[in-house]
Image (cartoon, rainbow, N blue to C red):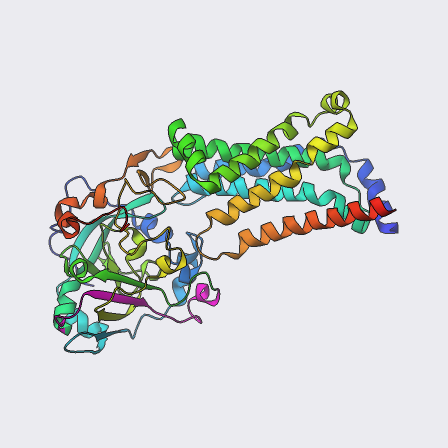
Amino acid sequence: MMGAARINRALRRVPAWPVYVVGMVPAVWFFWLGATGGLGVEPITALEHRLGLTGLQVLIASLAVTPLRRVSGIDLVRFRRALGLVGFFYIALHLAVWLILDLQSWQRVWADILKRPYITIGMSGFLLLLPLALTSNTLAVRKLGPLRWRRLHRLAYLAIPLGAIHFVMLAKGWQIAPLAYLAAILGLLALRIRGLRTRAAA
Amino acid sequence: LSVLAAPAHSAEAGLEPNTWDEITSYNNFYEFGTGKEDPKRNAGQLTTDPWAIQIDGLVDRPGSYDLGDILSGVSLEERIYRLRCVEAWSMVVPWVGFELADLLNRAGVQPSAKYVAFQTLLRPEEMPGQRTAILDWPYVEGLRLDEAMHPLTILATGLYGKEMPNQNGAPIRLVVPWKYGFKSIKSVVRITLTDAQPPTSWNRYAPNEYGFYSNVNPEVDHPRWSQATERRIGGGVFSPRVPTRMFNGYAEEVASLYDGMDLMGNF
């Protein structure tokens, strides 16, 4: 754990705000590409998919923080709020592109949410992320108290796999990537359950 | 390919084709990958010459028909058709081809034949998508005989007056403009006349999502999305959704094929 201690010492000097800036650069880049032909001849769907996939990747990274600390000793907890929020921003943009550029009508959006299971599931995941995003600030932690806050934020364990299930369900044919994302998330959650058990036993 | 004479008889006024770039860079051809840009990237290695189509089943003259031989017996023409993908996007494509009926008549369809089955090339060493079980390869499709014999149904060997690019189904593919795009099977190597409805790839994969008929129908939704509207490729980030038309706008020509049929049940 010598290496981990040195990394943690170095990380202590890094503030969290660059995570937001660096994290959102790809989103700006995607919109720029979409507007200038860089996403191919059908930029709307491409934009929608890239935003959704990046959001899922960042959320998986936030889910990996605790297992990473347990396995390697590297402590990224200070950056987890930023990761969670950046992931949420991507999912919100994904949703906005779907609503404004893709479906172009509230009626169509509402009909899809009610009628299409993969959209119902994706939307549920987003709604579960909403209270987490709203309470991802120091004031909310203080108001809720650490215990209630932590309990509330366990919703992530539900919201993030729902996002991956949404991804698996929208794929045509037996595609590997969506299943791999779902497996990674379930793996990270399984590590956590094991972690809780050992802690309870100790 | 020689320069073509007049534009198609079935081209309607104001039907502006998509650009060559749009038609050849945004493709569903899972044999070359599931991404829309994968076929263009991966189809270059496909060998399309020599090429032959095996015609068998309920025909008088079964056998292997060499592509050059097939083409010497038909006259190619341009057909500007709407193409509506089951994924709710669409294009307009200036195909070059000939009526499927011409080839079927040449093979001699027997009276007992009721359906036509089609098969795509199976060659995993040149078609990287076939190394993964995304679908049960080879890709197969099928039509009812009257659909196959309909004058709108063509075998296409090119677009924009040029040879068919590999990513669009070279060297020869089916085009059935009133059905969702996946019915228009690409890189055809086998045509079989049968008396029973043949299996079709997407129907086998998800029978509740992809029916045998798969006629474009704005009133019958795909279980995962609405088919009421579509987006024309090429409109950029603010491309509007436009209403989808019954039989993709070819109702006048083909609706009578389905007289009295329940199009909801036979989707």
A95 left or right, relative to A184: left
Q: Quadrant of the N terminus of chain B?
A: bottom left
Q: Nearer the viewer, residue B207 or B43?
A: B207
Q: What is the total number of numbered labels drawn onto the structure image? A: 0
Place of residue B93 in the rendered image (x, y in percent of width and height, measured from the top left): 25, 50
Q: Is residue A38 visible?
A: no
Q: Residue at x 64, y 51 (%)?
A: A184
Place of residue B180 in the rendered image (x, y in percent of width and height, measured from the top left): 29, 50
- Magenta residues (range): B108-132
Q: Residue at x 76, y 38 (%)?
A: A77
A47 left or right, relative to B147: right
Q: Nearer the viewer, residue B145 or A200?
A: A200
Q: Is residue B120 magenta?
A: yes
Q: Residue at x 36, y 46 (%)?
A: B87
Q: Residue at x 42, y 37 (%)?
A: A115
Place of residue B34 in the rendered image (x, y in percent of width and height, measured from the top left): 44, 55
Place of residue B215 in the rendered image (x, y in percent of width and height, measured from the top left): 25, 50
